[in-house]
Image (cartoon, grey):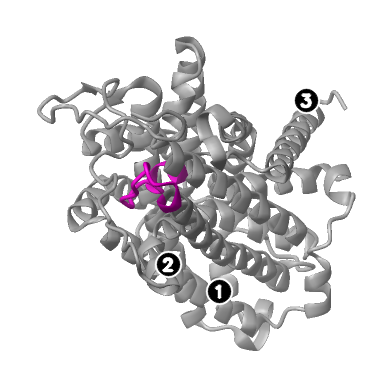
Amino acid sequence: MKEGFYMRESVVAPKHKFFETTEGSNKSLDEVNGSIKVPKDAGFWRTLMTYTGPGVLIAVGYMDPGNWITSIAGGAQFKYSLLSVVLISSLIAMLLQSMAARLGIVTGKDLAQLTRENTSKRVGFGLWIITELAIMATDVAEIIGSGIALELLFKIPLVVGILITSADVLLLLVLMKLGFRKIEAIVATLVVVILGVFSYEVFLSGPQMSQLFAGYLPTTHIVTNKSMLYLALGIVGATVMPHDLYLGSSISQTRAVDRSDRKAVAKAIKFTTIDSNLQLTIAFIVNSLLLVLGAALFFGTHSTVGRFVDLFNALSNSSIVGAIASPVLSMLFAVALLSSGQSSTITGTLSGQIIMEGFIHLRMPMWAQRLLTRLLSVTPVLIFAIYYHGNEAKIENLLTFSQVFLSVALPFAIVPLVKYTSDKRLMGEFVNKAWVKYSAWIATVVLIGLNVYLIAQTLGIL
């Protein structure tokens, strides 16, 4: 068997055991790996359609309820100033996700598998803990967002809504039986709903366009202002999701690619990257719309700003948003919030499986794995919901903190990703180009520096 980016065939572990070791298996997400055939001599658009799908699953993680709260709060407090952070974060996300996809396509392994293979058992276990905590932080956003959406739509008490969202363990099990393309189509539909709702609402809010476009230019105030820096890092953490890098390196392998054919590998990389960038552009637009909506409705007002319930109420309150106020707008917002929370559960579930199998070589039934991670995630949210009953603002503070934690956890995924995709022995001719490698390292160093600075400020050292 050839070396370099040509990997040996995997051995599928038996399915009858509750816990299984995956040390003898190289396939990531074995049940869908290579399950979608790719036409060999099709034209550009037909080939692109075949590869379109994984980018949607990646992008939905970049517009989950965690993005909503940080972007809305950023617009409400600092108007359009943090649009530059949304733009830079989105560009970094495109760069990193293209690297993750290339890693999976070329090596036939995901980022978690390669990290475990190239680290000691102790280091690998530590990285697994950090990554699991990042997934829990993501789950916190999904749980709170979905719970509040149910409360807004159906008047279900928040605690009950949180418990209902915890039962979505059954959702992905049903979807997986329909086939991976069906999952991609369902998530894409939910993304269209989210994009449509916020495009309409921002259009009605009448943002100041000249100031809006000026907001995409970075300013030094973002670093010097502690509150702005905290929210900026929350936006970075909510936009560049650590678990999405593991997910991207895995689901890029759902298309059947002959790794012994360099042209087939190059084609797969090309079209997967196009798909990823197109979908992440939609995520960038959604996050920008959220921040603009927060700025248009809340900046300069005396309202409690930047929270789901506040925005829901504001959209039907003419004293806040003027003539555009309508109960229909409020309900559309809640529907979009529920769509976001539920679609994000899919990426969380798949990422949890990838990380557990890759880092600790443990495979367990998806329902058991999802139930375990959901119980771990829902416990702190339930405690907060019960303790702060009736005070959604306090509960949503937990959501903002979770997004900052994601930013802190991000370097632990970026560093291995950049390292492996820059390794010519592993990637062969598909190794990172110089500008890609150095851009990724610069982004990593800057992010680590900002995190250290924020922590030092918080502790009073600076």
Q: CA distance from mark 3 to mark 1?
A: 38 Å
Q: Let me know if residue 139 appears in the view.
A: no
- Report the front residue among 368 and 148: 368
- Of the residues under marks 2 and 1, which one precedes in the sequence? 2
Q: Which residue is mark 2?
A: 48
- Magenta range: 247-264
Residue 440 placement, left or right of 251: right
Instruction: Characterize the local packing of mark 3: few (<14), some (14-19) or many (20 or more) Cα atoms within 10 angstroms.
Output: few
Residue 74 x, y percent position in the rendering: 71, 57
Instruction: Characterize the local packing of mark 2: few (<14), some (14-19) or many (20 or more) Cα atoms within 10 angstroms.
Output: some
Q: Secondary structure at mark 1?
A: helix
Q: Which residue is mark 1?
A: 198
- Report the front residue among 341 and 416: 416
Q: CA distance from mark 3 to mark 2?
A: 49 Å
For residue 107, what is the image quadrant? top left
Instruction: Characterize the local packing of mark 1: few (<14), some (14-19) or many (20 or more) Cα atoms within 10 angstroms.
Output: many
Task: Identify the disc placed on residue 459.
Answer: 3
